[in-house]
Structure formats: C-alpha cells, structure tokens
Image (tube, helix red, strand yellow):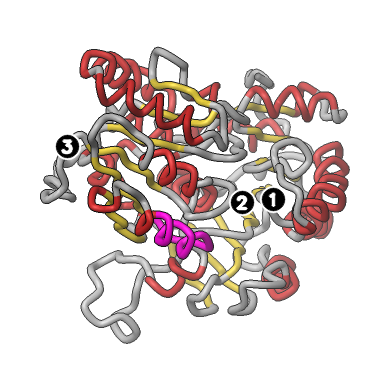
Amino acid sequence: MSRPAAGPLHVLRLCSVFEPPAARAATAPGALPGELDARAARFDPIGGMQNHTATLTRCLDAQGLRQTVVTSRLAGPRGVTPLGDGARVHRTGLRVTRLRQLWALSGLRTVLRAGRRAPVDVVHAHQGEDLATLPLARLAARVHGVPLVVTLHCSVGHTLTGRGPRVRLLRAVGGWIERSTLRRADAVVVLTGRTAAAVLQDGVAAERLSTIPSGFDPALFTGRDGDVFPGTPRPRIGYVGRLAPQKDPATLVRAFGRMREEASLVVVGDGPDRALVHRLAAESPAAGRITLAGFVEHARVPAVLASLDLLVLPSAYEEMGSVLTEAMAAGLPVVASDVGGIPEVVRHGQTGLLVTPGDPDALAAALDRVVAEPALRARLAAGARARSADYGWPALAARVAAVYDRSLGVAPDLEPAA
C-alpha cells in the first residue's frame, strides 16, 4: 500500500459517537452561533470520545487532510454537515437509545461510497463500548483496499468492568471482535501504556502499536470568560462529565456529604444517572451547597474549569479520562480514582491525589485534605499546569497523521509503543 503522489490524504473515520451538530435557527430559536443541538446533547451527553474524535478531525483538517466521518446521529437530524475546510460528517442511524449499533447498517452505503469524492487512503476506526464499529471498519478497509487504523478509546476486553448482562455480552463478544480486529489492523493506537501492554499480550505486534493520549485544545484555553458560578462560595469542588455508571458521580455526591471541611460541589453534566444524582443531592446533609449545573457544551468547559478550585473524577473504570488533561491545562488539582489509565495522567502527590474507586469515605478524606491545605492545592495546581504541556491536541494530531503515513509505508516507524 502506498500514498498517492498528489492530493491530500483522505481518511475515512468511523465512530459510534461524535459531537452533535450545531443548533439550527429553525429548530432552536435563540441558539448562539455554534451552539450544539441540545436535543442531541441530552440524548447522549458528550463525553471524552465525542470530544476526541471531533477535535482530532478539526486538527487534521487544519493540517490539510481530507476526512469523511461516519457516525450515529444521536437525537439530531440525519444528514451531512461540513467541518472545517475538508471534512464532512455523515450522521446516520435511528433515533433510539437501544439497538444503537444499527447506525452501522444505516451508514454502510456511505462507507462503501466514500471514495467517490476522492479515493480513500486510510480507514480509521474509533472503538468505544460498542460492537459494530470494528466489523464495519474491517469491511471498509477491505472494500477500499487501504490500511486500517484502530484507536481504542475503551478496551472492552481489558478496561470495561461490571457484572450486568450488557457488560458480560460486551466483554465476551466485543472482546473477541476487538482482539481479532487489532491483530489484523495495520496500526493500533491506544491512549495509555497500560492498554498498550495488554494488547501486546493479545498478539498485536509492537511495530504496529502507538500510544497517543487524548488531549486538550489550547485554542479553547486562551480566553478569560469570567466566573461561571458567581453565587457559589469557594472553595469549589467540581465534576464535569457524563452522569453515567462508568463515571460514578453518585459516589462523589455521597462523599461530599461526609466531608468535614466546608466547600461547594458543582456537578456539570447529564446522562442516564441524572435522576440518581439529583435524588442523592436532595437527600445529602450538604444539599444547600450542591449545584447541579446540567449539560455544558465542550467549548464552554474551559470557563467552567477556570471557575473551579478542584476537579474530581470518581470513575469505576476509565481508559484515560480526557477531562483530566483539560483540568491540568486550567491549572486544577485533581482527585481521581486509582483505576485504569488514570494514574498515567494524574501523578499522585504531584498533580493530584488518587483514591480507591467506589469508596466514598476515602474520597471524602482526600477532598478534605485538598480543601484544608491551600499550600497543597497550590502545589498540585502548579504541577498540573506544567504537565499539561504533554497533552496539546495539535501535536497529538500530528502524531496520529504520522501513524497514517507509516501505515502507508511512507514514513519510518518512530512512534514508541508505550
């Protein structure tokens, strides 16, 4: 396989989730320019994978690559929307929360016809907690006769935890699909060294493996938008993310109610655990100091982070946690679960504190410590800001583009596996 001699590289990007389209005046009166479609955002509140795929696409567009993105439509409209100068996003599938994997069947025609505008050079699949993306990507690579690149956002075989029937199905069927596809992929990208070690044991060749984390967009962290929560007393403990079992915001609300130090809790996000979080907040002995802010679109997250004093990520399992890199860019200390790839991002005692997942007492103790010790908070904040230099998206996107070149045989293999 070789790259065309002329013309920009054309990447066919397949991902089950992508940020929702911008709101349209006809369907969202009063929407701000670029504001996201609130219906779609609430249907499947945006998380790290949606932000990763969208920001990567924007950065590669700025580097001159042509991209065709095929993804599910969430609750937004089906159709094609431009992104930047050379990317087009095809949203497809049904407006249903169950059987979401049907988006892949609906998008099959688009995938097969993706080379009409320009020949496809690389297929890049983004694998999360879904079963359909990888088979579709393998078919696309075979039909177009091009290399297959896979990014693991959440390894269903190595990261996913839980005991329910959905989790068992994902680990059994999804794990098999994942392992078999990664062994055949021309290049595999993982977010952390922990996952790199796991897929190496699964049989992925080291020369085909790259470790490239999620990052933050420096352009979003240049302005000063003022205090987002002016009526909320400091210090402010914040959670920013999906309200979902994986993230375990319920443990944070329980822990906040057990703190000895006085602080405010701000919960930013939406999701399937919304009712549980709201109930726990209402029942908390610290209910009067809890603010439930709801969903905030990604472009406004830097202002939210700048208005906090401490970020908490109490995940039950996590591949990496991209909000952690954004918190570091904002100079926030972090208290997070010692699970998955989080310890590779949060250095205990240097940029934040790590605690046992699912333990509200341990989480409360760590929060008390950071709140009670301003000097510790300042030291962790300085360490976080310094470490954020490793996670700027433009440089990370350039490393992804280098993976494309290596898969096409036009660049030396210089990217370390871990």
Taking the image as drawn, is residue 330 in sight?
A: yes
Left or right: where 306 falls relative to 333: left
Give the residue type at disc 2: Val
Residue 11 is labelled as 2
Question: 54 or 265, which lies in front?
Answer: 265
174 up-or-down from 361: above or below:
below
**Mark positioned earlier in the residue sequence (1 or 3):** 1
Taking the image as drawn, is residue 145 in sight?
A: no
Please state the horizontal and vertical placement of residue 204, each as a whole percent of the image. 82, 29
Please state the horizontal and vertical placement of residue 259, each as a whole percent of the image. 34, 33
Question: 1 or 11, which lies in front?
Answer: 11
Q: Tell me the distance, in whole angstroms, between the alpha carbons under discs 3 and 2.
A: 46 Å
Give the residue type at disc 1: Val
Please state the horizontal and vertical placement of residue 277, each as a whole percent of the image. 44, 56
132 up-or-down from 352: above or below:
below
**Mark 1 vs 2: CB contact within 8 A:** yes
In the image, the segment drawn in magenta is 269-280
| Mark 3 lies on residue | 234
Residue at image position (36%, 40%) is 256
**Mark positioned earlier in the residue sequence (3 or 2):** 2
Please state the horizontal and vertical placement of residue 48, each as a whole percent of the image. 50, 46
Assess disc 2: are there few (<14), some (14-19) or many (≥20) residues with their C-alpha within 10 Å of its C-alpha: many
